[in-house]
Image (cartoon, coloured by chain):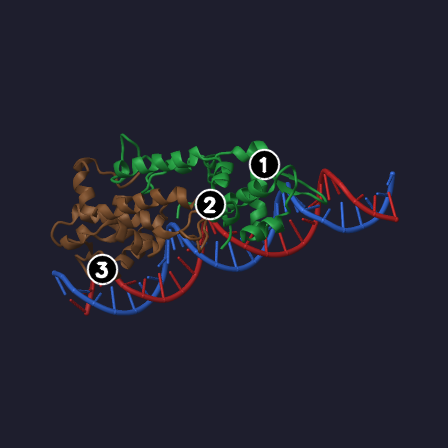
Chain colours: A green, B brown, C red, D blue
Amino acid sequence: MIFSKSTEYAIRATMFLCLNSSGSECFKINTIASAIDSPPFFTSKILQSLVRQNIISSTKGPKGGFYIDKKSKSIILYDLIIAVEGPDFFDKCLLGLNKCSEKNPCPLHKYFKKHKEELKLLFKKKTISDIMNESIKNEIHLRL
Amino acid sequence: MIFSKSTEYAIRATMFLCLNSSGSECFKINTIASAIDSPPFFTSKILQSLVRQNIISSTKGPKGGFYIDKKSKSIILYDLIIAVEGPDFFDKCLLGLNKCSEKNPCPLHKYFKKHKEELKLLFKKKTISDIMNESIKNEIHLRL
DNA sequence: AACATAATATGATTTTTGTCATGTGTGTTG
DNA sequence: CAACACACATGACAAAAATCATATTATGTT
């Protein structure tokens, strides 16, 4: 529910990088993909998009791969999600109505409004590294 | 976000029936589809599945169509959603991990847990007719 | 019997997900 | 420096799933 496969892989891969890349070591796509149990070529395409959007980084050649620098570790989940799903992801109507709004609400609008705001807040409050730090280090599951 | 097109159409169509079918009058699929602005053939396929699951009813022949009887108007949103999306819809992991659980949590598990329960509660609390009754009658939007 | 409409099956289209081949830059090695 | 290997970058392609459309069948009404 909620997220597409693309977003799931994007978050899990970014978390993996945040956990493991201390300094500027690189991780090649096969390492990442097997660590998070995702299809490698598809995952690499998603990560390349994140690189273009300056969320993670990459270098070519031997010893190359993907990495995340210290600054980007403090990216909030919200921005990562938006980077994959598009800017209006969190503003869509539950029932798929284009013009659903306060003035023109769908029947579920008033019930869902609060929850939507809280969800937005949840994803805006936490950075990737927050989540990694608050998790129990040797028990972080990114696969299975 | 959250729901598939199928579920969006299912909810909107059921709401339409709940609003308009007083007694046992039928509405043919074209009437319903244009009332909620959905592709008629696709919508009919979804409604047929709801009929098989005893959520709405239908009759064939002239003067036939889909309708909802008084009893089914009090179906809760949760059951309607489950009928389309499948029984484990509300229990899926945010990051797509199959074995994500209290004992084996993904990094987002503890943060999302509360919100997921609240969402479940929201959809379990309200029946379709509740929502229709609590809405402002002449301002219920099921299209656009 | 004729007709209208849901039910069903099937097919087309679009989106999402996943794979492959080739190009391009980078570092290593002789 | 040149050749090579390595790994990302890119775009074409393929498979699967979701979405949408059509045709045929079955059934109830008149």
Chain ID of residue with mark 3:
B
Q: Secondary structure at mark 2?
A: loop
Labelled pair 3, 1 in contact (Cβ < 8 Å): no
Q: Earlier in the sequence, mark 3 or mark 2?
A: 3
Rendered location of residue B39, percent (x, y):
33, 49
Q: Which residue is mark 3?
A: B54
- Chain letter belonging to callout 1: A
Q: Where the N terminus of chain B falls, by quadrant?
A: top left
Q: Is residue B22 left or right of residue A101?
A: left
Q: Under tag 3, what secondary structure?
A: loop
Say whether residue A97 is visible: yes
B70 horizontally vs A88: left or right: left
Tell me the kind of residue under disc 3. Answer: Asn
Residue in the image at 47% along x and 37% along y: A77
Label 3 to label 1: alpha-carbon separation:
50 Å
Residue A46 lies left or right of residue B70; in this view the side is: right
Residue depth check, mark 1 versus mark 2: number of the one nearer the observer: 2
- Give how far across and how far down residue A46 sits, in percent: 55, 44
Tag 1: amino acid:
Arg
Residue B137 spot, x, y in % from top left: 17, 38
Give the labeled residue for mark 2. B107
Q: CA distance from mark 1 to mark 2?
A: 26 Å
Residue occupying image coordinates x 16% and y 41%: B133
